Image (cartoon, helix red, strand yellow):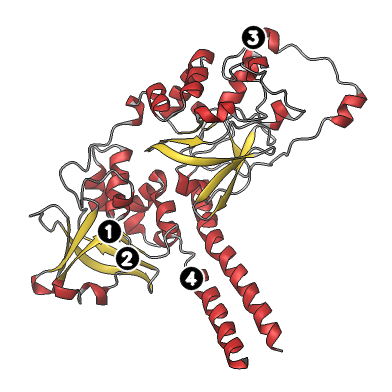
Amino acid sequence: MAAAYRLLFLLAVSLAAVSAARAHNITAILEGYSEYSLYNSYLSQTKVCDEINGRSTVTSLVLTNGAMSSLVSNLSLADVKNALRLLTLLDYYDPKKLHSLHGGSELTTTLYQTTGDASGDMGHVNITNLRGGKVGFASAQPGAKFQATYTKSVKEEPYNLSVLEVSDPITFPGLFTAASAASTNLTALLEKAGCKRFAALVVSSGVIKTYQAAMDKALTLFAPTDDAFHAKGLPDLAKLTAADLVTLLEYHALPQYAPKASLKTIRGGIPTLASTGKGKYDLSVVARGDDVSMDTGMDKSRVASTVLDDTPVAVHTVDSVLLPPELFGGAPSPAPAGASADTPASAPAPEAASAPAPAPTKQHEKKKPKGKSHSPPAPPADSPDMAPADAPDGDEADKAGDKSGAVAVGTGFAAMVASVAALVGASLL
């Protein structure tokens, strides 16, 4: 029995070490290599870096500045993102493995295959040992030429992360056909995703114009499904003034590009289009494994699906309406039976709504619970605490966010396993 406990203890310690090793950060690694600066920049702009950092086993095929410059010319960010995903292999390949492929050739899966946009096996890459000791990479398209060849190893973290330099990008006909976010019909997209009532509110309130203006720079939208507007206990949105309805809808959007993988890495308060500073109308993220929820301070809403991930725009559906405590901090008034929560009553003009309200009595002040307030972090490059049009450029903030997010996942799990190991060790004494 003692031997079994010792074995369990050693296993727990080993798992802690392995989990810590998984906390890799591709952008931090490439920062030390100036020849890959352009590649690294696009990893951050497209947020593919977060997808790479979220994988426990991955091989990143990187391009020099010259090869990357040729690739990105005349391409949209959405097309560049697909190219970077195709260069990300979901298996571990180091030089030894590349030169000892079974049968001299192997088909491997890439990040692009996981998007659902790849037709058939086009999200796979063919790795083949060529003459003269070279290793070639090509698309899975029958008869595809080996455009890219292995050049050298940049970084190896055995069986977790491998960074290899290749001579050229991997492409195939049809890879660069992603539609521009600017051409997306947002209303039609929301209706098709089962968010018709949210779409109707957005159009009737005029907030659709705010969303469309933000799409040129960066926008992440959380659209409640139609079922969310029938949820038990939902406040009667028809009682909101026109100004408050606009604030509520702006609260459902971030002035930054945040696909699901990037949401998992965000810590602290996140400014929304409705944010006024000092943490007011901010959101926060709660992530457990692959599940992501948005926390308003009053309740949480699960990110159910992603209906658009097209740099710099992401549209997610959520399973409940996001209720900011600044508007709904008091006891909510449910919508009356038979009334539709998405149809506001004849609201006063926004100018009238801005008139100062009478000061509440002390009795009311005591009864009204305080909503949670989140102090926002230093705003990253694509999440400023201001309107999208006034957003400053801030690459340094983006880099800091990438680092903290990637390290947090691995170190958190490592600490948990280490604690278990300590408990088991103590029980042996």
What amino acid type should be assigned to the residue bearing mark 3? Ala
Q: In which quarter of the image is residue 7?
A: bottom right
**Spatial separation of the CA atoms under disc 2 and disc 1:** 8 Å
**Spatial separation of the CA atoms under disc 3 and disc 1:** 54 Å
User: Residue at (9%, 73%) from the top-left corner?
Assistant: 132
Q: Mark 2 points at which residue?
A: 91
Q: Is 315 on the left-hand or right-hand side of 150?
A: right
How many residues crowd around disc 3 within 10 Å: few (fewer than 14), some, or many (20 or more)? some
Looking at marks 4 and 1 on the same chain, the residue that comes earlier in the sequence is marked by 4
Q: Secondary structure beneath disc 3?
A: loop
Q: Mark 4 points at which residue?
A: 21
User: Residue at (32%, 65%) from the top-left corner?
Assistant: 91
Looking at marks 3 and 1 on the same chain, the residue that comes earlier in the sequence is marked by 1
**Spatial separation of the CA atoms under disc 4 and disc 1:** 23 Å
Callout 4–callout 3 Cβ contact below 8 Å: no
Q: Secondary structure beneath disc 1?
A: strand
Nearer the observer: mark 4 or 1; the answer is: 1
Question: Is residue 99 shown to the viewer in this render?
Answer: yes
Which of 334 and 71 lies nearest the eye of the viewer?
Answer: 334
What amino acid type should be assigned to the residue bearing mark 4? Ala
Residue 317 x %, y %: 48, 35
Residue found at the very far front of the displayed protein: 337
